[in-house]
Image (cartoon, rainbow, N blue to C red):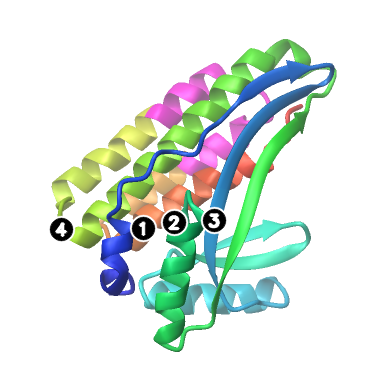
């Protein structure tokens, strides 16, 4: 398995990234930091798809993150630079071409229609960030043997329940489509045997929505 060699690092309990919320004229401040271990550097969406399959075959998430015009095939995601660097170095020693991508969130622009939903959107970001971390803990637990299949399926049900709760409160706004897509991912991952890479995929998929939310 991809992560067994670095399970000691993966199993370390870390505090979820500190998030700070504040509202100013036309914006919502949400501070969080994510450290993605990425596999190679694809040139386009086609090569990213091929590398995604390779990363997944090694036990990585294989989630394709599109950020600032570039494609990144993610292996895993952490909440501290040290954890990400340690895993990345371990994978490089196994001749896997990896690097660490740090993405920080800070200020989200609020459209005129979104200003009245600022508190709702604040709650959405906070809840999804927590759900993403829940998936991260489950992935670590599967790697170390702390979580069995029953517990993993229970976590996915918890993720889906949380996302459904958000969907009910966001029936027709900028989060609606992403929430439906994440719920579909949960349904897809819970069928069959659940691997740590499945939970890391869900973790990063949720984090992707947090990072790239357009508040309209």
Q: Residue at x 48, y 49 (%)?
A: 79
Residue mark closest to the camera, 1 vs 3: 3
**Contact (Cβ within 8 Å) of mark 3 with mark 4:** no
**Location of mark 2 (residue):** 201
Label 2 – label 3 distance at C-alpha: 14 Å
Earlier in the chain: of badge 2 and badge 4, it is 4
Q: Is residue 163 left or right of residue 174?
A: left
Earlier in the chain: of badge 1 and badge 3, it is 3
Q: Quadrant of residue 49?
A: bottom right
Q: Quadrant of the C terminus?
A: top right
Q: Quadrant of the N terminus?
A: bottom left
Residue that protrudes farthest toward the bottom in the picture: 95
Magenta region, main secondary structure: helix
**Contact (Cβ within 8 Å) of mark 2 with mark 1:** yes
Q: Which residues are magenta?
A: 162-182
Q: Residue at x 26, y 57 (%)?
A: 194
Dot 2 falls on a residue whose secondary structure is: helix
Label 1 – label 4 distance at C-alpha: 15 Å
Q: Quadrant of residue 45?
A: bottom right
Q: Is 178 drawn above or below residue 201 in the view shown?
A: above
Earlier in the chain: of badge 2 and badge 3, it is 3
Dot 4 falls on a residue whose secondary structure is: loop
**Location of mark 4 (residue):** 145
Label 2 – label 1 distance at C-alpha: 5 Å
**Location of mark 3 (residue):** 35
């Amino acid at each position: 398995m991809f992560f067994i060699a670095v399970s000691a690092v993966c199993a370390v309990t870390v505090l979820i990234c500190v998030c700070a919320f504040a509202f100013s004229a036309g914006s919502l401040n949400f501070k969080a930091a994510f450290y993605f271990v990425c596999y190679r550097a694809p040139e386009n969406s086609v090569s990213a798809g091929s590398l995604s399959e390779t990363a997944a075959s090694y036990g990585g998430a294989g989630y394709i993150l599109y950020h600032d015009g570039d494609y990144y095939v993610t292996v895993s995601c952490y909440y501290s630079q040290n954890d990400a660097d340690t895993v990345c170095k371990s994978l490089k020693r196994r001749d896997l071409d990896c690097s660490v991508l740090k993405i920080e969130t800070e200020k989200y622009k609020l459209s005129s229609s979104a200003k009245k939903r600022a508190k709702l959107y604040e709650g959405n970001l906070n809840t999804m960030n927590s759900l993403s971390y829940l998936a991260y803990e489950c992935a670590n637990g599967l790697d170390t043997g702390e979580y069995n299949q029953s517990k993993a399926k229970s976590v996915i049900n918890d993720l889906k329940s949380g996302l459904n709760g958000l969907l009910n409160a966001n029936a027709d706004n900028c989060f609606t489509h992403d929430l439906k897509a994440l719920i579909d991912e949960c349904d897809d991952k819970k069928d069959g045997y659940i691997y740590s890479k499945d939970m890391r995929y869900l973790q990063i998929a949720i984090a992707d929505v947090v990072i790239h939310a357009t508040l309209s």
